[in-house]
Amino acid sequence: MTDQAMSPEWKKGSAELLLLSLIETVPRHGYEIGKLIEQRSQGALRFHAASLYPLLYRLEKRGWVQGKWVEKAGQRRRRYYNLTARGRKVLAAQRKGWESFVLAISQVTGVENA
């Protein structure tokens, strides 16, 4: 394990990991991302607009995601986000680090699949 793999940033970085993972293969808008997180976690995780959108804007500013406004007939304009090449590298590193973190927690606590 590297020092970076077990960085203290994991506590706040897990939100980034979730968002990047959800737009890895399919561009999604913020509301859809929030709903997917809630559904897939069976309600255990929730992102409100007040925290979700600022995070998406930060990811965009870092160059990890790219946003594009899309207008569809009969619907309001939405900003869809997709992963950039730089974002893919960040996601791969975060996944690797998260796996190391979960393994370490499991080894310490004796809990499998922590």
Image: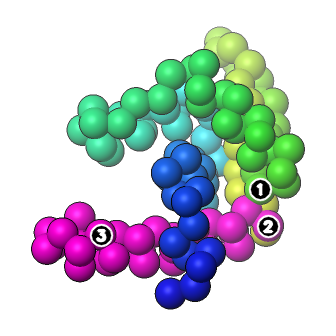
Q: Which residue is nearer to you in this view: 32 or 97?
A: 97
Looking at marks 3 and 2 on the same chain, the residue that comes earlier in the sequence is marked by 2
Residue type at the position of mark 2 = Arg
| 2 and 1 marks in contact (CB < 8 Å) | yes
In the image: residue 58, left or right of residue 107: right
Residue type at the position of mark 1 = Trp
Q: Which residue is nearer to you in this view: 112 or 87?
A: 112
- Of the numbered discs in the image, which one, if any, rests on residue 105? 3
Q: Residue at x 84, y 54 (%)?
A: 63
Looking at marks 2 and 1 on the same chain, the residue that comes earlier in the sequence is marked by 1
In the image: residue 41, left or right of residue 74: left
| 3 and 2 marks in contact (CB < 8 Å) | no
Q: Which residue is mark 2?
A: 86
Looking at marks 3 and 1 on the same chain, the residue that comes earlier in the sequence is marked by 1
Secondary structure mostly seen in magenta is helix
Q: CA distance from mark 3 to mark 1?
A: 28 Å
**Mark 3 or 1, which is nearer the eye?**
3
Up/down of 91 relative to 49, above or below = below
